[in-house]
Structures are given as C-alpha cells and as structure tokens.
Image (cartoon, rainbow, N blue to C red):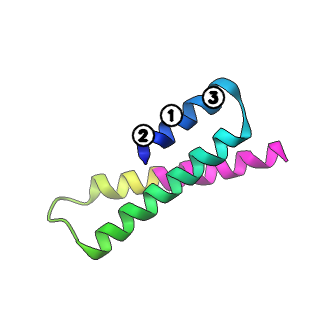
Amino acid sequence: MVLLMIAFAIQWGLFDGWPYLVLSSSFALGAAVSMWVREIVMPSPHPRAALVLAITILLLYSVYAFANLCFYL
C-alpha cells in the first residue's frame, strides 16, 4: 500500500493530475490507519518510535495532499 502511494505521488509530481493525488492520499491514509489498527490489535515488542514516525508522516502527507486537492476544484 505504501509502495502504491509512493508510485502515485511520483506520477502526480510528473503529470500534475488530480486523480493521482486523490489515489496517493487515500493510499497514505489507508496505510497509516492499517498500521495503527495492527498495533492496537497485536502490539509489537519492538520500539515504537519508527512506527509512530511512519504513521505520523503518512497522516501528514495525506492531510497535505487533500489540502492541495482544493486547488483542482
């Protein structure tokens, strides 16, 4: 899911089309929520700093992408 998000973000950067932006941000939001739910259901014994950072970055990117979507409307 994260790899698809990265691929659509690159395509959005190259072609500047709003469908790539919507797909990229929805995949980012889905990946962040999926990681968050997985940690709630089955907590891992590893340090959570990397996971918290990944979820935070994905959520921030998703908010940024949805905010950029206003320019296409």
Q: What type is the residue that disc 3 sits on?
A: Gly
Q: In the image, what residue type sits under mark 1?
A: Ala
Which residue in the protein does label 3 denote? 13
Q: For mark 1, does the 10 Å Cα neighbourhood hold few (<14), some (14 to 19), or many (20 or more) residues?
A: some
**Residue at the (61%, 54%) spot, across then down:** 63
Q: Residue at x 45, y 64 (%)?
A: 33
Q: Which residue is farthest right? A: 73
Q: Going by the picture, which residue comes out furthest to the bottom?
A: 41
Q: Closer to the N terminus: mark 3 or mark 2?
A: 2
- Answer with left or right where residue 58 lies relative to residue 40: right
Which is nearer the eye, 62 or 4?
4
For residue 49, side relative to residue 47 (left or right): right
| Measured Cα–Cα span from mark 1 to mark 2 | 6 Å
Sequence-first disc among 1 and 3 = 1
| Contact? badges 1 and 2 (CB < 8 Å) | yes
Which element is circle 2 on? helix
67 in magenta:
yes
List x then y, in percent, for residue 11.
60, 30
Residue 1 % position (x, y): 43, 48
Relative vertical location of residue 15 with respect to residue 48 in this rendering, above or below: above
Judge left or right: residue 40 versus residue 64: left
Magenta stretch, main secondary structure, is helix
Q: How far across and down, in percent of the image, does residue 34 sit?
A: 40, 63
Disc 1 or disc 3, which is closer to the eye?
1
Residue 66 is marked as: none
Helix, strand or loop at mark 3 = helix
